[in-house]
Image (cartoon, rainbow, N blue to C red):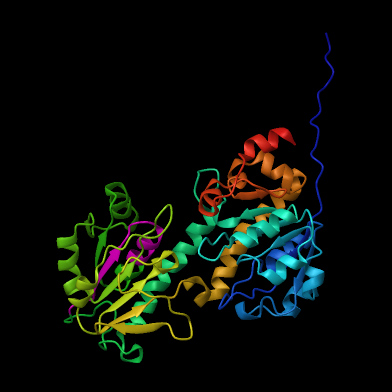
Amino acid sequence: MPQEEMLEVGRKKHHLYIGIPKETSYQEHRVALTPKAVALLVNNGHRVVIQRGAGVRSNFSDNDYSEAGAEVADIRKVFEADLILKIAPPTDKEIELIQHGQTLMTALQLNLQLKETLQKLMQKRVTAIAWDFIQDEDGIYPIVRTMSEIAGNTSILIAAECLSNMGEGMGLMFGGIAGVEPSEVVILGAGTVGEYAARAALGLGASVKVFDSSISRLRRLQDTVGQRVFTSVVEPTILAKCLKHADVAIGAIRSSRGRTPVIVTEEMVKDMKPGSVIVDVSIDRGGCFETSRVTDHDRPTYRSFDVVHYCVPNIASRVARTASIALSNIFSPIVLEMADMGGCKALVKQDPGFRHGVYLYQGTLTSELLGEVFEMPYKDIELLLAAF
């Protein structure tokens, strides 16, 4: 017998109102969306409001955004939007402007996040998403990985500058040429930062040695860089011996929870060559060198035991335009998917990777990590979604 045809029920597309404020955190030069990404969103029927001067430090002018279809306005107009896209966590002034029930997408920086900030957002029943905790379909953190790629590559360029006479180093050219011994580079950590630092160093002709506590990460790095490099587990005697001969040491150790462990002692640093260079990329979580202390882009280096230390936490802001484009390439598809799903709440329910980044859902704390850090009660987001 003839059967009636079953037609697909289409999802109701949601038009988003997106606000992009100017970053006010110290030496944060990135912007969440580039003019090209704004044009893509506007052409799909969405409204984008950006604060005046938000892209200037990434070399995107207000005129670029205006021509792309964005409204260029003051900060109060920006915070009238339903979805706020930011790089750094909100300041007290910005929290005052946040409206009840808004959606906020920013980084979750535990070293900057305050309990009072969290409580204020909870009072306003905000849904807050940490973009650095969003996962893709393979369980990878795409934004963290992209920023780590930038940090790994840039750390080698920084080390090359610090080794030169202009950087008050030994006057060495990073890498090597015919008849001249190549630079020796020790990389601590075989994650994404370590991998891309190794790629850049090998590309310049340096001799590279990589240390990590995980054999599987060391094996993966060997496979991905495409050539054999010296690898070793973190064994103090071997590490100290390699650091004695190193021209450059890159700290790329990451801890899944809490502070980065210190694996290079003061005594090891004392034994390094005079004028050698340490770039501690791990400084945003405390650093993996005992002699590391936080610096900034204005005064990025200092000497300890005649070794040049570079310990700027936000290396990606050194190349703000590249970093902004990389961030925008990830944010814009997420926003488009959010609209296709019917809004932020629908995407939270249907996309487990996006849901992994949620730490406040309509004012309720859902992050176990934040709950433990601040000793606050939290609820499983799966249970909250089932209740709503």
Looking at the rendered structure, the number of numbered marks drawn on it comes to: 0
- Residue 280 placement: quadrant: bottom left
Q: Can residue 163 be seen in the rendering of this structure?
A: yes
Quadrant where the image shows the N terminus: top right
Answer whether residue 298 is magenta in the image: no
Q: Position of residue 61 (x, y in %)?
A: 70, 80
Nearer-the-camera pick, 303 or 157: 303
Answer whether residue 194 is magenta in the image: yes
Q: Which residues are magenta?
A: 181-199
Q: Position of residue 276 (x, y in %)?
A: 25, 80
Vertical side of 24 occupied by 229: above or below: above
Q: Position of residue 288 (x, y in %)?
A: 33, 65
**In the image, farthest residue toward the top:** 1
Q: Position of residue 267 (x, y in %)?
A: 20, 72
Vertical side of 163 occupied by 37: above or below: above
Vertical side of 363 occupied by 155: above or below: below
Residue 8 located left or right of residue 197: right
Q: Can residue 69 be seen in the rendering of this structure?
A: no
Residue 309 located left or right of residue 209: right
